Amino acid sequence: MTDQNIEKQLQIAFQLLKVFRPFYPHCLVVPFGSIISGPGTRVSDCDFCLVRDPVPHLAHVLTGPRYFPPQLMPIVRRLEEESGRSMSPGKGGATPPTVPSAPPPKSKAVPRSKEDRLMENKALLSMASKVIRDINATRIQPIPHARCPIVKFYHEPTGLQCDLGVDQWYVCVPLPPLHVR
C-alpha cells in the first residue's frame, strides 16, 4: 500500500468525522484493517468504524500513537492540522464524556430479540447511509443482516471502496499476535 493510498484513506476518515460529529459530538471514526496492520494492497478496501459514544480510555487507545503505526503518524498529524480536526477527543475534536465517579445502579438487562437487533441495525445503517452522501459517497449499500452490520460505499473523490461499521470498536483494538505452542 502506498503512502498516497494511506493518505486517501485517512482523508476519508476525517471527512466521515466531519459529517458525523453534528449527530454524535463525541464520536470517533477509526480506520482499521489493512491500513493499520500493513498487508494491504493498492486495491484493498477501506475499513472504518464509527464509535458513537466512546468511553475515554477507549478513545485514547483507538486514536493515539499506540494505535497508528509510527509511519502513519506524520500523515495523521498533517491531516489534523489541515482539517482543524483531531482524531483524538479533546484536541480540536469533541471532549469525551466524563467517567462517573460511581457506577450506575445495576439493572437487569432485557435481552433483545434478533428482530429487535435487526430493526435497530436497519435504522442505524439507514441514517449512516444518508449522512455519508455528504462526502460524495455513491453505490451505498447497507448490510444489516451481517454478523457485523456495515454500510458499503464507493468514495468518488478517491476512487476507493469503503466499509463503515458502527459501534463495533472491538474489531479495531489491536491484539498481540497469537502464538501456537
Image: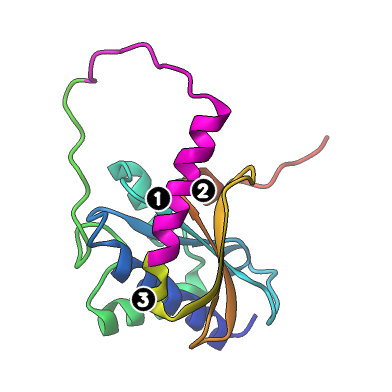
Question: Between marks 1 and 3, how big is the CA–CA gap?
Answer: 28 Å
SS at circle 2:
loop
Where is residue 13 drawn, in percent x and y?
Answer: 42, 70
Can you identify the residue that label 3 sits on?
134
Q: Residue at x 33, y 66 (%)?
A: 17
| Chain-order first, disc 1 or disc 3 | 1
Indicate the amino acid at tag 1. Answer: Val
Can you identify the residue that label 2 sits on?
173
Foreground: disc 1 or disc 3: 3
Mark 1 closeness class: few <14, some 14–19, many ≥20 residues within 10 Å: some
Foreground: disc 3 or disc 2: 3
Q: Is residue 171 above or below residue 133?
A: above
Q: Nearer the viewer, residue 14 or 164?
A: 164
SS at circle 1:
helix
Can you identify the residue that label 1 sits on?
61
Whether residue 123 appears in magenta in the rendering, the answer is yes
Extreme residue toward the right, this view: 181
Question: Between marks 1 and 2, how big is the CA–CA gap?
Answer: 8 Å
Mark 3 closeness class: few <14, some 14–19, many ≥20 residues within 10 Å: few
Q: Are marks 1 and 2 in contact (CB under 8 Å)?
A: yes
Question: Between marks 3 and 2, how big is the CA–CA gap?
Answer: 28 Å
Indicate the amino acid at tag 2. Answer: Val
Q: Are marks 1 and 3 in contact (CB under 8 Å)?
A: no
* Location of the C terminus (image quadrant): top right
- Range covered by the magenta-colored residues: 103-130
Can you tell which quarter of the image residue 41 is in?
bottom right
Q: Residue at x 67, y 74 (%)?
A: 44
Indicate the amino acid at tag 3. Answer: Asp
- Dominant secondary structure, magenta: helix
